[in-house]
Amino acid sequence: MSLKKWQKIYVNRSLNMGSIKSIGFDMDHTLAPYNHINFEALAFEKTLDKFIAAGYPKELGKLQFDPNSVIRGLLVDHEKGNLLKVDAHKYVKKAFHGKRPLDKDERHKLYNSESFKAENLKSVDTFFSLSEVQLFVEIVDFMDRHPGRIEKSYAEIYHDLRRYIDLSHADGSIKTKVMATPSHYIKKDKHLCSALIRLLSGGKSLFLLTNSDWEYTNAVMTYLLGDTLPDDYKSWQDFFDLVIVTGQKPKFFTSKNDFEEIDPQTNKGTLHKGTLEKGRVYAKGNAAKLQEATGVIGDEILYVGDHIYGDIISSKGLVNWRTMLIVEELEYELLKLEDTQDELEKIQESLREREVLDEELQKLRSLRRSLDFQLKKTTELEDKKKSSHLIRELEKLDDKVSDKEGVLKAFNKTIKNIIENREKKIHPVWGELMKVNLEKSRFAQQVETYACIYSGSVTNLRFYSPFKQFVSFHDTLPHDIE
Ligand SMILES: [Mg+2]
C-alpha cells in the first residue's frame, strides 16, 4: 500500500524502533487533536471576559476571534506589539504591528540591521498560544486605533494577558466547556485504538505524560478511546503502563519533584514514594524517577508530543529521549502544497531564468566599468578621437544596462507576485509553516534539529511496523546535491 504524503512519518535522525522499549505520549494535540477554531474561539472569549472584568474598556468585548491571524512558529515582540515570522537564519521576513504589516525598511530598522535575540521574544510553540497571541494582536490594533484608551505599555498588556489566560485554564472556564461537549472541541480519530495496539503488539510499553490534570485527562481520554476499547480492556488506562498527569513539562525533565498518587474519585494527590504501578494515576514527578521506576532509560524511550519546546527540545536535550513531533498542520499543508505544485515549478523555472538575466546584466555592468576606466585614461592622454568613440559606446551600453535593469525589475516583481499568491493559497496571512518565502522557517529548523521523526498525526504510527528502521536521508549539504 502506498501512503499518501500526509500519512507518512518523516525522518530527521535515523531511528530504529526495534531499540525502543517504551513510548510516552503527550495528550493535548498529540493523542487528542483539537478542533482549533472552536477551541481557540472559546479561549479567546473567556480570556477577553477577564480583561473586561479587570476594568479594561468594555469596547474590547466587540473584538472578534480570527483563526487566520496567527500560526505556530511565529515570534511575539511583546514590548513593541509586533508579530514576526523569521527564517532559519533569524532574519525577519514578515512582520505585523497589530494588524498593520511592517514594510521592508521597518523590519530592517527594527530587527534585521543587527542580530537580534530570538530568545528574548515569545515563541508561539503550541496551539494553546494561538488564541492568546491573537488577542494580543487585536488589543494592539485597538490601542493604535484608539490612542489613550488603554494607558498601559504593550508589555504590560501582554503580562495581563498571560495572567488571564492562565486563570481561564485554572478556574475551569475553558475546561468545563470542553468536558461538557468534547465532540465540539476534540476530533476523534477512529484509528487511535489500532495505532496503540500495533505498538503494544510489538512489545512496547506505553505511558501517558500530560500537563493536564486528572479530571480533564480522564474526560478527554474516555471520549477518545472509551467506545472503541478491545473486549478485554476495562478502560482507556489499560493501554498504558503508566499514567502521569499534571506533569509540569518542561520542568518534568529537570526537576527533583516527587510523584503524587491521585485519587481518581477526588482528583486529590498524596505524596508517593517507591514504584509506579499500572492502573494507578500519578501526578508531577520527574523524568529521572520515571526512568528509575521503569528501568527504561534515555534513548530506549520515544516521546511523542506536539510542543516543540516543552515536549521535544526538552526531552531530547535534557534526558536524551528519542522524539516524535506531531505537526497537525502538515495534513492540511501537504494537500495545499500539492495543489500549488504548478506554481512552485513556475517559481523555480523563473528563478533559473532570473539567474541568466542577472548574469547578463553583470556582464554589461562590468563591460561598462572597463570602458569607463579606458575613458579616464584617454581623457588624461587627451586622445579626443578615442574619447568620443568611448563616450558613444558608453551611451549605448548605458541604454542596454538600463533596459536589462528594467526587464530584471519587472521579472522580480512577477516572481514576487507568484510567490505571494502561492503563499496566500497555503495561508492567507503567513504562508507555509515550514517555509518563509522559499526558505526554511525558524520553526522548520527547530523541527529538523530536535524531532527525530515527525508526522501530521499520531495515528500514522499504525502504518509502520513497531520494529521499523526509520532512516534519515537528510544529511545532505549543498555540495552533495549540485
Ligand atoms: Mg500537547
Image: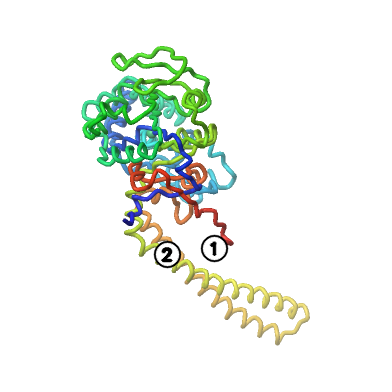
- Please tell me which residue is depicted at 36% across the width and 62% down the height of the picture: 341
Residue 364: image quadrant is bottom right
Q: Secondary structure at mark 2?
A: helix
- Please tell me which residue is depicted at 35% across the width and 38% down the height of the picture: 201
Q: Ligand 1 closer than 8 Å to the CB at disc 2?
A: no
Amino acid at dot 2:
Ile
> Which is more toward the observer, 299 or 156?
299
> Which is more toward the observer, 335 or 87?
335
> Which is more toward the observer, 401 or 71?
71
- The crowding category of the residue bearing disc 1, from other C-alpha atoms within 10 Å (few below 14, some 14 to 19, many at least 20), is few
Q: Secondary structure at mark 1?
A: helix
- The crowding category of the residue bearing disc 2, from other C-alpha atoms within 10 Å (few below 14, some 14 to 19, many at least 20), is many
Q: Which residue is mark 2?
A: 347
Amino acid at dot 1:
Ile
Q: Residue 312: tell me if it is visible.
A: yes
Instruction: Name the quadrant where ligand 1 sits.
Output: top left
Q: Position of residue 196 (x, y in %)?
A: 33, 37
Vertical arrangement, residue 270 with respect to residue 290, above or below = above
The residue furthest top is 270
Q: Position of residue 19 (x, y in %)?
A: 48, 40
Q: Which residue is mark 1?
A: 481
Vertical arrangement, residue 275 with respect to residue 44, above or below = above
